[in-house]
Image (cartoon, helix red, strand yellow):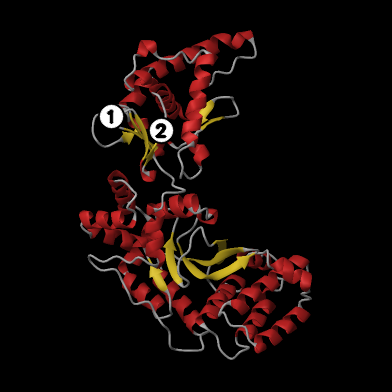
Amino acid sequence: MQKKHRTAIARIFADLIKADRIIDSDEMECWQRICAKYAIDSDIKTDALSMSFAEALHIICSSGANGPGGELLADCRAMTVSDGFCAHSEALVMITLMLTLEPGGFNADVISIPRANFNIDIATALYIESDFDPDTNRAIAQSYRTIFKELQLAGFHFVYLPNIIEHYRRTRSELFRNILSFLAPAVSSEGIDNIYRSLTRMTTAGFCKDILCNKCGITDLRRTYPALLIKIGNSYVGEDEYANYLRIEVDSDVVADVQRFVDLFSRMLSSDVLVVNASEEKDGQFHFHGFYKQLLDIFLVRRNIRSTVVIDPYKEEILFPELDARAAGLHRREKALYTLMLCQGAEGVNFSQPRTSGQLDRHNRRTDRVCRRYNMVYGLFGGDEGAAPDLSQGNIRGPIFSILKKRIAAVHGLYNPADYNLSKNHAGAFVVNLEPEMVFIKENGPQPVPLAESELFRRLSLI
């Protein structure tokens, strides 16, 4: 057996022993037998401290039919009952080992992430998907109470985001805005309005991609099948506390999947008495604990936000609504340049000198077109098109580019701030790497419209 397998085994048993937060003499005797059986020495034990629970399981599951999976699972069962009692917290780890090492019809895996990134209560079962699945969502909506009660009676709290968002939508908007303002008094009224709109439009797929992946950094969920994400516990990797999650695939037969899972889990428990969470949100009432608090905090705490960009040329502002911020310290020359860059998209603006004289005419035509487009945008921000800075001159455009980059970098709280700033692509062109659907402009009405569908974009495309 390779060293990595022994290290993984040591990590798994460490989490299993610590699961119920009690370490007794029977477990220590069992641990000594495990160390002897798998040749786990002090070096292996030390290395295991730097391995996550998910990494350990991945190593064991990848070892194939000749790996220690089946025998390891039997040893884990023996460890669990070595003190004569299997607690709920131990059963969470054991069900995870069972469904990953001997799936038995379940498609399951484990995800370990830094606890500070995303932290919900242990035994929370959160429905996730990266793309809307109509059949699974229809099945959950039709059988929500059955699923909720089945999991509740086994000590789990089922969270289905569409139900929470629907509760927010049904609430009087004035009341909900007052609650948001109470929780985040430093956020402006405009910022509260943006938070309210973002929350009430949130979908499960959007939550997975924009919040769990982009904001919380759980990249394993960027492409996830419809699943239950179940918090099974916390453990330390080095000096950092990690949260461990079991992900179980579900489909339109979700009720049967949940019942099989609950039956399997309940058979492991040594007691029929469980403390269950019986509270549910009601009209005019909002939970502020567990997942509910996490959800609100994600929107109310102004950091690591994947914000849209809104251009307001009449107020001469560039806004980041979800962050409740604006780009400060910019003259209209920089604002016009940023707007032009956003309109240019992946093409960007390229002032690089050609390498051969044969390319000079093409370079001059391209530069002239960029300058004429810039002049138009400069005029939209209230300037005189004929007096706009000449971007073809390096000594003029250099300071404009420099100031713009500094001021965009000074907008604090953006997730992946480099996406919002100027950068050079492989062709030497300056670009802003934001998706078109993230950029809006205020034109004739109070509500912004997508920049790619705006009158400005249409006029620039004619130049």
Question: x and y percent of residue 435 in the render?
Answer: 45, 37
Question: x and y percent of residue 320 in the render?
Answer: 38, 39
Give the quarter of the image for residue 449: top left
Are there few (<14), some (14-19), or many (20+) residues within 10 Å of tag 2? some
- Which residue appears at 29% of the width and 68% of the height? 281
Q: According to the image, label 2 marks what residue?
A: 328
Quarter holding the C terminus is: top left
Residue 127 seen by the camera: yes
Are there few (<14), some (14-19), or many (20+) residues within 10 Å of tag 1? some
Quarter holding the N terminus is: bottom right
- Which residue appears at 65% of the width and 85% of the height? 27
Query: Who is closer to the viewer here, 3 or 401?
Result: 401
Q: According to the image, label 1 marks what residue?
A: 443
Q: Is residue 173 above or below residue 28?
A: above
- Which residue appears at 46% of the width and 63% of the height? 227
Give the quarter of the image for residue 354: top right
Residue 133 seen by the camera: no
Question: x and y percent of residue 26 in the render?
Answer: 66, 89
Q: Secondary structure at mark 2?
A: loop
Query: Who is closer to the viewer here, 321 or 200?
Result: 321
Question: x and y percent of residue 396 in the render?
Answer: 50, 15
What separation in Å lies between label 1 and label 2 (alpha carbons)?
Answer: 21 Å
Question: Looking at this rendering, what residue extends furthest in the bottom direction?
Answer: 84
* Amino acid at circle 2: Ala
